[in-house]
Image (tube, grey):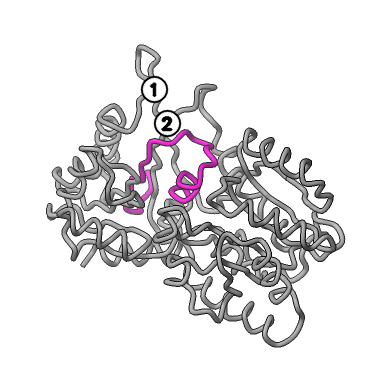
Amino acid sequence: MSARPTLLAAAAIEAGSLFAHAVNTVKMAEGFARNGLNVVFVCLEPAGGPVSPERLNALYGLSAPLDWVMLPANADGTPRGDGMGFAVPALELARAREARIVYARSYVLPALTAREGIPTLVEAHADPSNARPDFADLLAATHLPGLRRLVTIAPVLAQGYAARGAAADRIVVLPDAVDERLFARPAVPPPSLLGPGPNAVYAGHLYDYKGIPAILEAAALRPGIRFHLIGGWPQDVERTRARVTAAGLTNVTLHGLRAHAEIPPFLWGADVALLPPSAAHPSAAWTSPMKLGEYMMARVPVVATGIPALRHWLSGREAVFCEPDDGAVLARAIDEAIAPGPPRDGRVAAAHRLAERWTFTRRAATLLEACAA
């Protein structure tokens, strides 16, 4: 047994999941481990059976150890879900491992552990209008002494939760973070995976509200720039590939879904990184994409749409802002971001300084301090 205090991190995700919230939760758990805690990570066992720690380390690019516990499906073969079927065994595990702190990306478990008197941190990025009864119960549980902090990613979410009865003084707003050990550009980067440039890179899912239509419009207007889209579920890749083909675009490459640990070399070979969320989606008011910190830590010039959520975290010194949902405007912003000279270098340096404040290690330390207060 480790002599270090134990933190139980919990989320009803399948081990090895590459959903953004799953990666975020795993990397937060690693952040706690880097702060000197023994971290037990309880999650769901995939249908194919347990995943080895070595495989999980490789997928997520982990360099600090996690003690993985994967809950199998229910005895009748049905999925556990994120309710009591997950929360009860997770609570029992917290008791058995004598967890000093619980960090949960879950609705039911943190209310249970807080009532048990275990100091509890919970992460929530949900729309405040979320109608699930267990989400309402979680907001009410913020008044319990054991629920030390609810962490979210935007003031509008914090305000919405407080309006629904959450304890405002228990809510902390922090941006999504970056793994500096994984994404920091090495002194001598490996050979580029992208080929000759200039190369524009987008890393993330290929949903329309992420700005994919605007990227394809920009690609049509800038045939001399190679556009690389890293990520996307297979069905989204195929849908986007059909659009690329229909538009006759020869300068767009779809690289498909990649393990989190495989993304940094793509960024190190980029001349510009794209973050063009649409203004038409509700998340424009609160999104805090992990890719922003990753772009900035990799020292790549960033183009971002000026949606309220991103303008909250960026001063304008770190990226070239442009209007959302307009490929022509995005193309001109890419030209500006790529152009060599002091303005570009200054933005990259300012972005890197900001990214150094956004690491998972620091984010975890901030929450531990709040938990102890």
Q: Residue at 43% of width from left, 54% of height from top?
A: 28
Range of residues picked out in magenta: 1-26
Residue matched to label 1? 79
Residue matched to label 2? 44
Left or right: 33, with 135 as reference point: right
Q: Secondary structure at mark 1?
A: loop
Mark 1: which amino acid? Answer: Pro
* Quadrant (top left/top right/bottom left/bottom right) for the C terminus: bottom left
Q: Residue at 46% of width from left, 28% of height from top?
A: 45
Q: Is residue 297 above or below residue 58?
A: below
- Name the mark on residue 290: none
Pointers 2 and 1 in contact (C-beta within 8 Å): yes
Residue 69 sits in quarter = top left
Mark 2: which amino acid? Answer: Leu
Residue 193 visible in the picture = yes
Q: Residue at 54% of width from left, 65% of height from top?
A: 293
Q: Position of residue 213 (x, y in %)?
A: 63, 51
